[in-house]
């Protein structure tokens, strides 16, 4: 049954991606925030389809921890689910992504209109400078900055190496850091076509004051909180 549901979902998502890529291109004359509200209709629709076609639901805990000012979100990275859902579960965000994603037909076109922070991950220290330079600009525009510090998706139960890019931006800008743990990979596995019914828990941690802290200190604090919470999250609902 999961295979059939996943096939139906894939067809509908592909059609939506093509449709919204055209909408995104037409939104070019609008302001960045207006484009964001329009284009993220795609994200709302995909997650709605995930609920009603795939049986994937979600709960969000800790919204009261979100600060009033723009912040740097440092989140666990397990699947494609969070790359879609986090763009509307949080205030308007500018995600840090690899440049190659902008070259993907249709999807990349739409993503470009969201004004993400696109970096060349092979550029080393220059990529970190890109995050800080562009990230400060996005924060000044009222956007939050979303970073997956592990850099790539990791399977449930695993931990990647936490990079300092997002923490460095926070340390340089003074923006608070918001750590986020979740278990999306249990129902929407990394690089898997077949997805499973279940309930994803997104847990938002208390904001961390970045002032007078180094990027290394912030990274250690975020890693410790996220990995501890990963062990405390309830399991996703039983697969059907």
Image: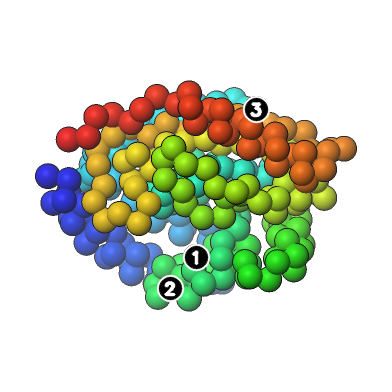
| In this rendering, the label closer to the viewer, 1 or 2 | 2
Mark 3 lies on a secondary structure that is: loop
Residue 90, position in %: x, y?
A: 54, 41
Sequence-wise first label, 3 or 1: 1
- Is 121 positioned to the left or the right of 9 in the image? right
Residue 60, position in %: x, y?
A: 46, 30
What residue does disc 3 label? 206
How dense is the environment of label 1, judged by Cα within 10 Å: few (below 14), some, or many (20 and up)?
many
74 and 105: which is toward the camera = 74
Mark 2 lies on a secondary structure that is: loop
What residue does disc 2 label? 104
What residue does disc 1 label? 111
Identity of the residue drawn at 38% across and 34% down: 200
- Distance from the alpha carbon under mark 3 to that under mark 1: 29 Å
Sequence-wise first label, 3 or 2: 2
Residue 91, position in %: x, y?
A: 58, 43
Q: Which of the 4 quarters of the picture holds residue 136?
A: bottom right
Quick check: can you spot residue 202?
Answer: yes
Disc 3 vs disc 1: Cβ atoms closer than 8 Å? Answer: no
171 and 160: which is toward the camera = 160
Identity of the residue drawn at 13% across and 51% down: 4
Disc 1 vs disc 2: Cβ atoms closer than 8 Å? Answer: yes
Quadrant, the C terminus? top left
Identity of the residue drawn at 62% across and 66% down: 121
78 and 112: which is toward the camera = 78
How dense is the environment of label 3, judged by Cα within 10 Å: few (below 14), some, or many (20 and up)?
some
Quadrant, the N terminus? top left
Quick check: can you spot residue 139?
Answer: no
- Distance from the alpha carbon under mark 3 to that under mark 2: 35 Å
Residue 154, position in %: x, y?
A: 46, 48
Q: Which of the 4 quarters of the picture holds residue 210?
A: top right
Mark 1 lies on a secondary structure that is: helix
């Amino acid at each position: 049954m999961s295979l059939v549901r996943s096939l139906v979902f894939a067809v509908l998502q592909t059609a939506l991606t093509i449709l919204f890529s055209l909408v995104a291109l037409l939104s070019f004359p609008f302001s960045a925030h207006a484009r964001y509200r329009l284009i993220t209709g795609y994200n709302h629709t995909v997650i709605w389809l995930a609920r009603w076609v795939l049986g994937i639901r979600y709960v969000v805990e800790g919204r009261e921890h979100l600060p009033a000012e723009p912040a740097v979100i440092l989140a666990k990275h397990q699947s494609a689910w969070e790359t879609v859902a986090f763009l509307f579960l949080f205030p308007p965000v500018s995600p840090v992504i690899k440049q190659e994603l902008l070259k993907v037909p249709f999807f990349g076109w739409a993503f470009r209109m969201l004004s993400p922070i696109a970096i060349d991950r092979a550029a080393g220290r220059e990529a970190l400078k890109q995050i800080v330079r562009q990230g400060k600009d996005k924060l000044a525009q009222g956007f939050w900055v979303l970073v997956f510090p592990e850099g790539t998706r990791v399977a449930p139960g695993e931990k990647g190496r936490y990079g300092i890019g997002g923490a460095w931006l926070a340390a340089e800008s003074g923006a608070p850091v918001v750590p986020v743990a979740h278990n999306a990979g249990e129902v929407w596995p990394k690089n898997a076509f077949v997805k499973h019914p279940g309930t994803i828990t997104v847990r938002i941690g208390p904001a961390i004051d970045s002032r007078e802290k180094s990027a290394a200190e912030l990274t250690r604090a975020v890693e410790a909180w996220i990995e501890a919470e990963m062990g405390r999250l309830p399991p996703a609902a039983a697969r059907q």
